[in-house]
Image: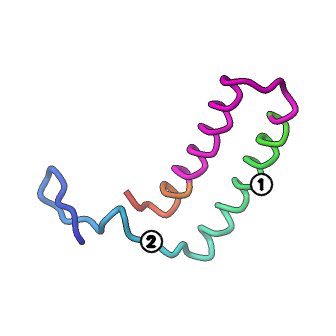
Amino acid sequence: MTRVGMGGEVNMSTLQYVQPTEEQKVVMQNFRDKYEALFNELKTLEKGRGMSLCLTKLEESAMWLNKAITKND
């Protein structure tokens, strides 16, 4: 499946898996470790709707970061 951008360029589907390079894997793991430390620290705070949303958005931003690192957009 391909996608045509506004400029007429054809891009790989953003729905397909992109195998990260070894260098990208190192960068991704470095950020994953930082996200995990922040996630664990946040979990020590009072629970509630706001904290649930905070943790969800943190997870979401980690996903988008991986997508950005592999330039799959």
Q: Is residue 69 left or right of residue 49?
A: left
Quarter assignment of residue 56: top right
Q: Is residue 23 magenta?
A: no
Q: Is residue 44 left or right of residue 39?
A: right
Q: Residue at x 73, y 24 (%)?
A: 48
Look at the image and give the residue range highlighted in magenta: 43-65
| Marker disc for residue 17 | 2
Density class for disc 1 (Cα within 10 Å; few <14, some 14-19, many ≥20) is few
Q: Which residue is mark 1?
A: 33
Q: What amino acid is found at the position of numbered circle 1 in the picture?
A: Asp
Depth order, front residue of 49/13 = 49
Q: Position of residue 57 (x, y in %)?
A: 59, 37
Q: Residue at x 49, y 57 (%)?
A: 67
Density class for disc 2 (Cα within 10 Å; few <14, some 14-19, many ≥20) is few
Quadrant containing the N terminus in the rendered view: bottom left
Q: Is residue 47 left or right of residue 6?
A: right
